[in-house]
Image (spheres, helix red, strand yellow):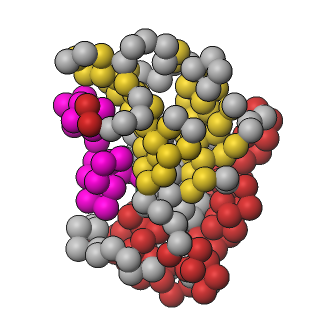
Amino acid sequence: MKYAVISDIHSNLEALSEVIADIDRVGVDAILCLGDIVGYGANPNECLTIVRERAQHVVAGNHDYAAVSLTPTGTFNPYAHAATLWTQRVLGSAEADYIRRLPLTIAVDDMRLAHATPLEPEEWRYILHPSEAAGELLRIEASLCFIGHSHLPGVFERTGDHSRLRPFGPLVLDGPGRYLVNVGSVGQPRDGNSAAAYSVYDAQQRVVELRRVPYDIATAQAKILRAGLPRVLADRLERGE
Ligand code: ZN
């Protein structure tokens, strides 16, 4: 089985459309989505429609749950909060119902999927350092987890008592270790690269690959401004931050 794993789309239709086109070029057996389909960008309903049609397995992110008031927004910065209120206003009722039905974590084959931490996904904690990944990898039953949330792609590996963050290859996950893979962000990359990010995982070969896809940033920015969303949400897209 070959999987495309997408996350943190954030209502960016231009980025999602290019990523789906790239996925179709690569050719995969299933698409997995790790949440934050909405929030920040100008096309929440359109992005939800595409995810619903194309992804076989989907978990919710904090911005998705915030859009239907299933999680508090007290920790959101003012821009995220403004985008949440805007999303709540424009979200269709069928799209809102779809979000409400999404789980926070699921197992797919021998993989565990979550937006934030696999063990306590409802806490929305970030995993940024190997020490933070270590506890998860020690206690989780799956030897391979896919996460999003930080918008920073990377592969955390735990072998014995040792944990490290490995740069994305293509990387062969064939050691005795346990792996936690952050697949990066489709619609709001924050690693200094403005191109959309997602991952392809080949389960037979045990190879995980990070893919980068350029997209029409100017159109996504213009829509954000036209919608009356904060300008910073448009500006950051071209800087990849
Ligand atoms: Zn996000």
Above or below, 34 against 157 in this view is: below
Tell how many labels: 0
Using the image as rendered, state which of residue 168 and residue 125 is in the foreground: 125
Instruction: Give the quarter of the image for residue 137.
Output: top left
Relative placement, left or right, of 54 versus 80 is right
Instruction: Give the quarter of the image for residue 58.
Output: bottom right
Instruction: Give the quarter of the image for residue 127.
Output: top left
Above or below, 176 against 72 in this view is: above
- Identify the residue shown where x is 52% and y is 66%: 102
Q: For the N terminus, which image quadrant? A: top right
Above or below, 92 against 26 in this view is: below
The location of residue 41, given as percent across then percent down, is 53, 66
Say whether residue 44 is visible: yes
Relative placement, left or right, of 137 versus 216 is left
Using the image as rendered, state which of residue 105 and residue 116 is in the foreground: 105
Relative placement, left or right, of 145 versus 197 is left
The location of residue 32, given as percent across then percent down, is 60, 47
The location of residue 112, given as percent across then percent down, is 46, 42
Say whether residue 211 is visible: no
- Identify the residue shown where x is 76% and y is 32%: 26
Using the image as rendered, state which of residue 196 and residue 230 is in the foreground: 196
- Identify the residue shown where x is 43% and y is 50%: 114
Stretch of the chain drawn in magenta: 115-137
> Would you say residue 147 sits in the magenta stretch?
no
Using the image as rendered, state which of residue 4 and residue 144 is in the foreground: 144
> Would you say residue 132 sits in the magenta stretch?
yes
